[in-house]
Image (cartoon, grey):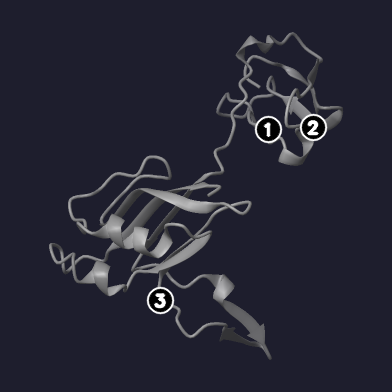
């Protein structure tokens, strides 16, 4: 809502909330500048956005950013603790729901889609964030092939970090705790 002052936003007649860009934090920035529009508010074609501005705003700088739900990512290292989803409370104690609590990357496509491509896979010391991963100085040469074997053509997949294909092919940095970073593309088959 850059360029606007204060007002309300409506999408297809549904109020998604008030914006107040002219109210600045101690850092001299708006306290909130991005507003989420739930997908259920949108129509397949022709959506009506109504902005009721209470101050002197200029809508030419408003930006609408679409989220790519077809790109999925995973990033986990051998140092990660097991997910809290793998435990439940019973009788005042924490009980594991699965026997295997070792770190693994879990990928899942939305809406009946399947993993159609592995765009990035590195096992070693990759860094970055989803959409911007970079291989580090120590990486397994077979990471992408291993991830493709586990995931291609499936709606979801789990890749354990102790997979022999990954562990045995990355001896360049044996003393280092390794990280697995994956970026995959989902689509209808």
Q: Quadrant of residue 102?
A: bottom left
Indicate left or right for 174 with 92 as reference: left
Give the residue number, with chain letter if any, for mark 3.
102
* Quarter occupied by the N terminus: top right
Number of residue marks: 3
Question: Measuring 37% from the left and 40% from the top, which residue is drawn there?
Answer: 132
For mark 1, give the secondary structure. loop
The mark closer to the camera, 1 or 3, is: 3
For mark 2, give the secondary structure. strand
For mark 3, give the secondary structure. loop
- Crowd rating for badge 1 (residues with CA inside 10 Å; few <14, some 14–19, many 20+): few
Label 1 – label 3 distance at C-alpha: 37 Å
Indicate left or right for 15 with 97 as reference: right
Closer to the chain start, of discs 2 and 1, is 2
Label 3 – label 2 distance at C-alpha: 43 Å
- Crowd rating for badge 2 (residues with CA inside 10 Å; few <14, some 14–19, many 20+): few
Picture coordinates of residue 120, whole percent (x, y): 34, 48
Question: Measuring 74% from the left and 8% from the top, which residue is drawn there?
Answer: 56
Picture coordinates of residue 179, whole percent (x, y): 31, 60
- Crowd rating for badge 3 (residues with CA inside 10 Å; few <14, some 14–19, many 20+): some
Give the residue number, with chain letter if any, for mark 1.
35
The mark closer to the camera, 3 or 2, is: 3
Indicate left or right for 159 with 126 as reference: right
Closer to the chain start, of discs 3 and 2, is 2
**Where 19 sits versus 61, above or below?**
below
Give the residue number, with chain letter if any, for mark 2.
17
Q: Quadrant of residue 45?
A: top right
**Where 136 sits versus 59, above or below?**
below
Q: Quadrant of residue 151?
A: bottom left
Q: Which mark is residue 70?
A: none
Circles 2 and 1, Cβ within 8 Å, touching? The answer is: yes
């Amino acid at each position: 809502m850059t360029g606007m002052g204060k007002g309300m936003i409506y999408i297809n007649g549904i109020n998604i909330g008030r914006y107040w860009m002219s109210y600045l934090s101690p850092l001299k920035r708006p306290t909130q500048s991005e507003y989420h529009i739930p997908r259920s508010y949108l129509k397949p074609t022709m959506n009506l956005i109504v902005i009721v501005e209470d101050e002197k705003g200029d809508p030419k700088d408003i930006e609408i950013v679409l989220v790519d739900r077809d790109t999925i990512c995973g990033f986990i290292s051998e140092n990660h603790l097991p997910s809290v989803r793998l435990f439940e409370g019973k009788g005042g104690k924490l009980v594991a729901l699965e026997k295997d609590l070792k770190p693994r990357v879990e990928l899942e496509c939305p809406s009946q889609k399947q993993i159609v491509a592995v765009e990035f896979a590195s096992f070693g010391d990759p860094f970055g964030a989803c959409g911007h991963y970079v291989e580090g100085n120590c990486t397994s040469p077979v990471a992408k092939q291993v991830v493709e074997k586990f995931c291609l053509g499936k709606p979801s997949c789990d890749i354990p970090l102790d997979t022999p294909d990954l562990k045995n092919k990355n001896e360049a940095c044996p003393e280092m705790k390794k990280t697995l970073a994956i970026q995959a593309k989902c689509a209808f088959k």
